[in-house]
Amino acid sequence: MKQLTCILLACIFSLSAAARQRSAHVNLIPEPVSVVNNGGHFVLPQHVTIQSAAIPELKVALDLLKQKIGTATGSFVSHVTHSEKTPAIRLAILAKKEQTLGTEGYQLSVTPQQIVVKANEPAGLFYGVQTLLQLFPADIESKEKQAGVKWQVPCLEITDYPRLGWRGLMFDVARHFFTKDEVKQYIDAMVRYKFNMLHFHLTDDEGWRLEIKGLPKLTEIGAWNVKKVGSFGTFSPPGPDEPRTYGGFYTQDDIRELVKYAKDRFVNIIPEIDVPGHSLAVIASYPELSCTPGAEKYRVRSGEQIMDWSRGAPPIALVDNTLCPANEKVYTFLDTVITQVAKLFPFEYIHMGGDEAPHNFWEKNEQVKQLMKREGLKTIPQVQAYFEKRVEQIVVAKGKKFMAWDEILEGGASPTAAVMSWRGMKYGIEAAKAGHKVVISPTEFAYLDYMQADEATEPRVYASLRLNKSYQFEPVPPGLDPKNVLGAQANLWTEQIYNIRQAEYMTWPRGFAIAESAWSQPDKKDWNNFVTRTEDHFRRLDLAETKYSPAIYDPAVRVRRTADKQLSVELTPEIQGLDIYYSFDNSTPDHFYPKYTEPVAVPKDASLLRVVTYRGKKQVGRLITIAVSDLNKRSGK
C-alpha cells in the first residue's frame, strides 16, 4: 500500500508539472526550449532597478531595457552594479558555466519578487532580454507612455538556447540602396527574433555600394543609376540624357560603424562581393575587366531587361555582365577589393557570389577558349570553377574563408569552399554530404522577395511563398550530417523593394518562421500555436511602428476550368477560424454577403471578383479585387 501511494504521488507530481508546462501560454518567438509557468505575476514597480556587473558587452541590452520600460511605462529606470535591496531585474553571468546553454543560451526566472536572467556569456543575456521584453504586455513596444496597462510579467522558468549557430537574413542593398541608418533599423528588428547574421549583398548589376581605396570609379560611376519606379525588369532603357543620380554607397568609415553597431548586438556581418556574374556595375566602371568588345558602352543597370530567362538558368545574357575569367587584370582587381573587404569585416567568411553567371559570351570568346586549352578545361562550368578557385586563393591569403552560392559545385568546387545553397534543398544536401560547410537558404522556404499573398495585393514577382510554407522549413533534413550545416538563412532580394518600409513588409512575419526554424527545437514547432503567437506580435510590431504583411488573413485564390469549360474559383484560407465573403456585382463585400463554402462559378458577364475575410463580425483580411479577365489568364485561357 505504501508503495502504491508513492507511485500515485509521483504520477500526480508528474501530471502537475506537465500541466504547468502546457499552461505556459506566453507568445514568444522563437519558441524556447523549455517554459514552465508557475502561476502568479511579477508586478513592475514605479522605480525599476536593473542590476548587473559592469560588463561593456551588456550596454546595449541595458540601454534597451531602460529605454523600453522607461518610455512605455513612465517609470524611473536605473542601473546599478550592487544593491542592498532586491532589484526588479537582475542580469548575471553564471559563475559556473552551464554546458547546455553554450554561448547564446540563457535561463530566465520570474518570481513575484524579481526577474533574473542568467547566461554563460553576454550574448545569452542579450537574447534573454529579448525574451523578457516579449513577456511584458505588447504596449512595451510603444514609443510613448501607455496609460491603463497592468505592467506585469507571468511567473515562469525558461531555459533556452539555439539549435543552429548561423541564423541569418540576407539584405540586398545593391538593387536599391538603403542608408546606414536604415541598415541599423533592419538590424534592430532582426535581433528581436534572435537572428545573429546579416548577409550584406553589396554589389550587383544595379550598383556597387562599397568604397574601395584606389578604385574610385566603383563609387563614382558604379554606385549610381537612373531612378525608375514600377515593375523592375521591364523598364525602358535609360536615355543618354537621363541623370544617373539614384543610388549611393557606404564609405569605409560607414562600414566600420555598421560592423560595430552589429557586433554590439551580437550580429556578424558577412559581406558579399558578387562575381563573376552580376557585375555590370563593375564593368561600367572598369570596362577593361570584361571579355567583350564594346563594354565601354555599358552602363549600370537601372532595371531594364539584360537577361533572357526563357530557357531557364543559366540565363542568356543580352549584355555581358561577367568579369572575364581569362583576364589577369580581374584577379589583380579582386585582390585589391578583397584586401580591403577583409580588413573592414572581421567575420571569418567572405561571400564571393558565383550565382547565375551567363555562359553565352564566354562560349564565343577567344580569351576564354585559350584559357580552356591552356588549363585543360572541357566545359564552361569548369571555367567558372577555375575562376572560383583562384578567387578562393585570394580570400584565403587575406586570412578569411571563402563562401559562394551553390552554382560553384557544378564545375568542381574546392573542398574547403563553403556553400550557401539557394536553388533548393538538394544542393545543400549534396554539398554537405560532400564535406562542404553549408548554409541552407532554399528558394522554396526562405526567399523573402517572393509574393506572400495573391498577386492582386503584391508587387508581382515570378513566385509565391506564403507564411505556412516558410514555417515548414527544416534546415537539417534527415540523413544530413549536422556538423556540416553552419545554419539557416532567409534572403531578401530587393529588385521590387524600393524603401525600408517595404523591406520590413516583405521580411515580417516570414522572418518569424525562419527564426523559429533556426533557433527552436524541431519538436517545438506547431503551426496553429505559431499563428496565435504571430498575431500577438502583429500588435507589437504595430506599436514599434514596424511594417509587416497581414497576408495570413487573405485566402489563396486558385482558378480552374471545369469539364464544361466554366471558370471556377477556389478560395483557401491560410489559418483557421476565418470566414470568406465575396461579390461579383462590383460592390464591396462584408459579412452580410455570400459566404464562401465551396468553389464558386464565375457568372458569365461578371467583370470583377471581390473577396474579404472576417473573424466573426470583424474584418481582418484586406479587400482583394481581381478582374475576371485576370482570372481567365490564370486559368490558362
Image (tube, helix red, strand yellow):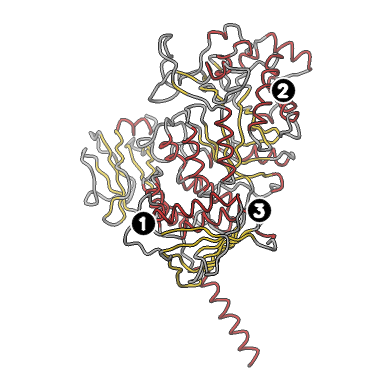
Is disc 2 placed on a helix, strand or loop? Answer: helix
Residue 182 rendering spot, x and y as whole percentages: 46, 36
Q: Which mark is residue 407?
A: none
Callout 1–callout 3 Cβ contact below 8 Å? no
Look at 66% across and 15% down and name the residue there.
324
- In the picture, measured across the screen, residue 539 lies left or right of residue 262, that is left
Q: Which residue, as the protein is rendered here, is positioned at the far bottom?
A: 1
* Residue at image mark 2: 382
Residue 278 rendering spot, x and y as whole percentages: 57, 22
Amino acid, disc 1: Gly
Amino acid, disc 3: Thr
Which quadrant would the C terminus be assigned to in this image? top left
Q: Residues within 10 Å of mark 2 (few under 14, many from 20)?
A: many
Mark pair 2, 1: CA separation? 54 Å
Name above or below for residue 465 compared with residue 112.
Answer: above
Which quadrant would the N terminus be assigned to in this image? bottom right
Q: Which mark is residue 103?
A: 3
Q: Quadrant of residue 359?
A: top right
Closer to the camera: disc 1 or disc 3? 3
Amino acid, disc 2: Gln
Mark pair 2, 3: CA separation? 41 Å
Look at 71% across and 44% down and name the residue there.
484
Q: Which mark is residue 577?
A: 1
Residue 471 rendering spot, x and y as whole percentages: 51, 49
Residue sitting nearer the eye, 563 or 567: 567
Name above or below for residue 581 compared with residue 438.
Answer: below
